[in-house]
Image: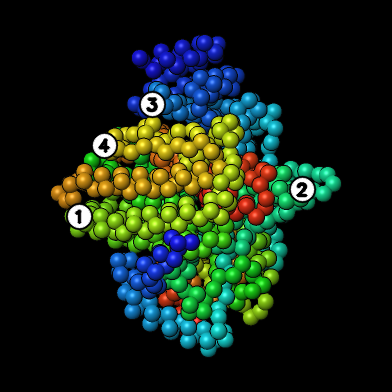
Amino acid sequence: MFEIIKNRLFKGVVTGSLRGMGPSRPEDLEALGQELKTAIHKRFGRSFHIREVDTGSCGGCESEIIATTNPIYDVQRFGVDFVASPRHADALLVTGPVSKNMALALKKTYDAMPGPKYVITLGDCAPDGGLFKGSYYVEGGVKNILPVSAHIPGCPPDPMTIIRYLLILLKV
Amino acid sequence: MDPKLIFKDILEKGKVPFVNMEEPYDDEFSINVNLGNFKAACLELHKVLKSPVMMLFATDVRAKRGVFTLSCVFSSVKYRKWITVTTDIDGEDPRFESLSKEMYSASLFEREIKEMFGIEPAGSPDSRRLKLHDEVWPEGLYPLRKDFPAVASLWRDPAMSCKDVCVGGVTMSAAASGEYKFKRIEGEGVFEIPVGPVHAGIIGPGHFRFSVAGEPIINMEARLGFTHRGVEKILEGRTVSDAVKITECVSGDASFGHSLAFCQAVEKICGINVPEEASVVRAMMLELERLYNHAADIGGMAVDVGFSFPSAYASIIKESILALNKELTGSRYLKNVNRIGGVNKNLTIEDITCLRGSLKGILKDFGELKDMLYNSVSFMDRVDTAGILKKKTAEDLGVIGLAARASGIPMDIRKDFPGGTYKKVRFDVIKESGGDCLARLNVRTAEFAGSAGMILQFADILKCGGQKLFADHPAVRPGSGLGYVESWRGAVLYWVKLDEKGTIERCKIVDPSFHNWEALSFAVLGNIVPDFPLCNKSFDLSYSGNDL
Ligand code: SF4
């Protein structure tokens, strides 16, 4: 317990402290976040809940989605949250080229969501299979199975990109 | 001593005749036997070398010679060699005698060979399909055979007797209507809990089926394959430089380890000498990959017992390392660094200064993370004696890498087959004997410190500038060879065969997860279901690396 209190005091607030964390500037994240928050307020009341489904990704995309929730980016403070059940979700975030084995599970997850619902694809694999396009075992993209409203490109997209694209999606 | 004499001696003692032997490379040895002697030869080597089956795979060379070939790879630390036993299998009626009853570590490989090539492991105790799920893929279509078209649109052709139907927008093969048979445990008070493939967290898909009697798990079976994308088939016919990109996407958290193993295999075949500076950069990146994954897993274990503050701390550490990766190479996951013959990225003096600075902060944070975890009685109580993997079980299953080291098996390619680079630095192979979650945690924390130390030693060796980063004009030539890398989970193995045109004829990939997933089923026995996430995270195996 002592260790935790000590670290809590000494470490201080890290959120938004992007210095030494690559090229993005902290101001950008804050500005982007506030905009995102406003957009979410307008369209979804207060929060935007996302259910993530991996349809055969390499795990890179998942790692970056998780990174958006770490204390540095902390996307939850802007109203975006990742939920455990499709029944709680406003949007489905799909990664991977849709392995045949996952097609049915993907469909079922979508069906379990209450309307209105959105499907967002994330990562270069998702729109058409990406590097795995043409393989005997991929369905050739999420759009063949579900109506997709937006896409976040990258292999994998970094947390800033994910936040930026979520904002674009909510604005249109 | 001449390796030929050694292996001749081994086989003669076991009374196994062979056809011929050769030593294609310094670190490889290959033994060719007749099909009838294949099993005996494998069992003999397994016994003498005390090595599990590291790889067992087939290739389709029916177009040239009318046969399939079957190869079984063992490793020998004593002789510093990878030993491959090969044999030919009749192309018309392909079958071989199953090895898995006597040597369990062959079992998953045999199932894979059967579904991918249609080669029958006669007498095998388990022939259920792993990756081509019965619900969506018809029997009798073998994707890794050469006459199976690489392009998906072709097999949709009705002439290939696999007409697709559309069920609610999902394409299903009409011919596939099978069902996977889980092992069932029945009896009064025994419940089954099915979980997955879509899980509550943001993780890969897999199906776990628990049988519980009261609280403790009495059986757990993992059904994987949900992320199968056909990587090995996709790689066929590609040029080697195109393929590097694909290997980076086999398992996203080990993208560097995978591409490195592939590059090493190709470099070996083509006789390319990687410049010294490049091999040091490579080793450094491999250790950086280990660092961020170990940090993530330690945090993951904390999260799975509901200890959120340290896990947030760990995610800061992970983020700092990813940011450092980006700073050094332009990619958070170290992609586009490897190329055949070397690396794309030069590290400058400024890079090294930045590296040293970041690493100092990271190590400080890590020290605090460790203190928080090890000083928390309730956390230690959860990890201690949870999910024990016994040494004997680990040996029988052929568990490798980190999980093996935590169960008292000190295997580590960095020490066992050090190459040039790892010989230049000091480090210890971390071994624990408990085999429980705590042991795996201890291995991770110790390796974190070890890797950070190694990175600093590599930084001293680097010349930073004016050095060649990759070999010129590597001429690609036909042949086959094995690439191996101690990635953070364990040995990543790539067996690559190039054809006359210099493109890939066959590439067999074995991620350590393929060896280790079954270990989880044994480790969780007797534990309660709420400890499953913890046990699972303590192994942290890859879905996509396993499923390919
Ligand atoms: S887009 Fe890239 S990172 Fe994402 S799942 Fe596909 S290969 Fe992996």
User: Spatial distance from mark 4 to mark 3, Cα to Cα?
Assistant: 18 Å
Find out whether the residues at labels 1 and 4 contact each other: C-beta distance under 8 Å: no
Camera-nearest label, 2 or 4? 2
Contact flag, marks 2 and 4 (Cβ < 8 Å): no
Closer to the observer: label 1 or label 4?
A: 4
Q: Earlier in the sequence, mark 2 or mark 4?
A: 2
Residue that appears at 26% across and 45% down: B458
Query: On the image, numbered disc 2 is attached to which residue?
Result: B213
Tell me the CA gap for discs 1 and 4. Answer: 21 Å
Residue sitting nearer the eye, B102 or B148: B102
Residue for badge 3? B80
Say which residue label 4 marks. Answer: B424
N-term mark: 1 or 2 = 2
Amino acid found under the numbered disc labelled 1: Thr
Locate the N terminus of chain B and report the quarter of the image it occupies: top left
| Mark toward the viewer: 1 or 2 | 2
Q: Is residue B191 visible?
A: yes
Name the N-terminal-most of marks 1 and 4: 1
Q: Is residue B462 left or right of residue B298?
A: left
Cα–Cα span, label 3 and label 1:
35 Å
Q: Which of the marked residues, 4 or 3, is nearer the chain's N terminus?
A: 3
- Numbered circle sitting on residue B129: none
**Residue B394 picture location, percent across and down:** 56, 35
Identify the residue under disc 1: B348
Local SS, label 4: helix
Calculate the distance from the C-alpha at mark 1 to the C-alpha at mark 2.
60 Å
Mark 2 chain: B
Q: Are marks 2 and 4 on the same chain?
A: yes
Amino acid type at image mark 2: Ala
